[in-house]
Amino acid sequence: AQSVAQPEDQVNVAEGNPLTVKCTYSVSGNPYLFWYVQYPNRGLQFLLKYITGDNLVKGSYGFEAEFNKSQTSFHLKKPSALVSDSALYFCAFSGGGNKLTFGTGTQLKVEL
Amino acid sequence: GAVVSQHPSRVICKSGTSVKIECRSLDFQATTMFWYRQFPKQSLMLMATSNEGSKATYEQGVEKDKFLINHASLTLSTLTVTSAHPEDSSFYICSARATGGRSTEAFFGQGTRLTVV
């Protein structure tokens, strides 16, 4: 079955340090991959997507992600983390029926 | 970006009653909307796909008679939790995608926290 996996339940990073939230995919054909962020008791906000083209995708709030076909990964990155980046992050792929299927989520905690 | 509005954001109801949640696309037309359920610290579970002018498509294991979905217009889908029980307490989120298919991002409502007492 097609899926995305987020191997880390939680990531802790100090403010100002680079952050990485990992995502790997198992999707046939050309994968359409997305990153979303969720703040407490809120819906999800779109960060960025990879459809085709450049492997490095830039998105909202200074986030970027690199599509790596050989490693089947789509890790989310930011050069310098902020405390306000603390939230729940979801990787997702777009499959049949226009459905989005989400990973299990990674809680990012950025500390001073 | 596009806006999806979900209402109410929070509702408390008694066991046995029904609750209706509305999802509106404010600045675009959505022929398809999606309803998710999220348990604490867990991922989103797709419940059903709401299709404008036709019956919703439910995911396996989701009771269609309990979770009634109506998509009467291109900007409004509703989810009604019928005869609610405490185990239905959860966070419900709707989303919509503009035309363009798989490559377009989905926009999400703010979510509805349902508590059944």
Image: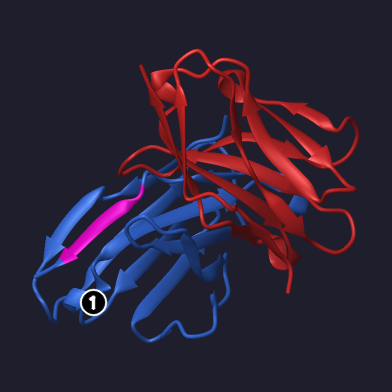
Q: Which residue is at the front of the view, A22 or B45?
A: A22
Q: Chain of mark 1?
A: B
Which coloring applies here?
Answer: by chain
Q: Quadrant of residue B52?
A: bottom right
Residue at the image position 36 percent from the left and 42 percent from the top? A42
> On the picture, is A35 further left or further right than B16?
right
Instruction: State the residue in front, B55 or B109.
Output: B109
- Answer with left or right where residue B100 lies relative to residue B67: right
Q: Is A93 contained in the magenta span?
A: no
- Position above or below: B72 against B99: below
Q: Position of residue A30 (x, y in %)?
A: 88, 54
The residue indicated by pointer 1 is: B87
Q: Which chain is red?
A: A
Is residue B56 among what the camera can see? yes
Q: Secondary structure at mark 1?
A: helix
- Badge 1, how many Cα within 10 Å: few under 14, some, many 20+? few
Q: What's drawn in magenta, residue-wise?
A: B111-115
Q: To which quarter of the image does residue A38 belong?
A: top left
Q: Say left or right for B27 vs B112.
A: right
Residue A63 position, x and y percent, is: 62, 24
Residue at 88%, 47% in the rendered image: A69
x, y percentage for residue B33? Answer: 55, 58
Classify residue A88 as left or right of residue A63.
left
Per the picture, the main secondary structure of the magenta-coloured stretch is strand
Chain letter for blue, please.
B
Which residue is at a point 56% across and 68% down the rendered structure image?
A: B49
Question: The N terminus of chain A is located in which quarter?
Answer: bottom right
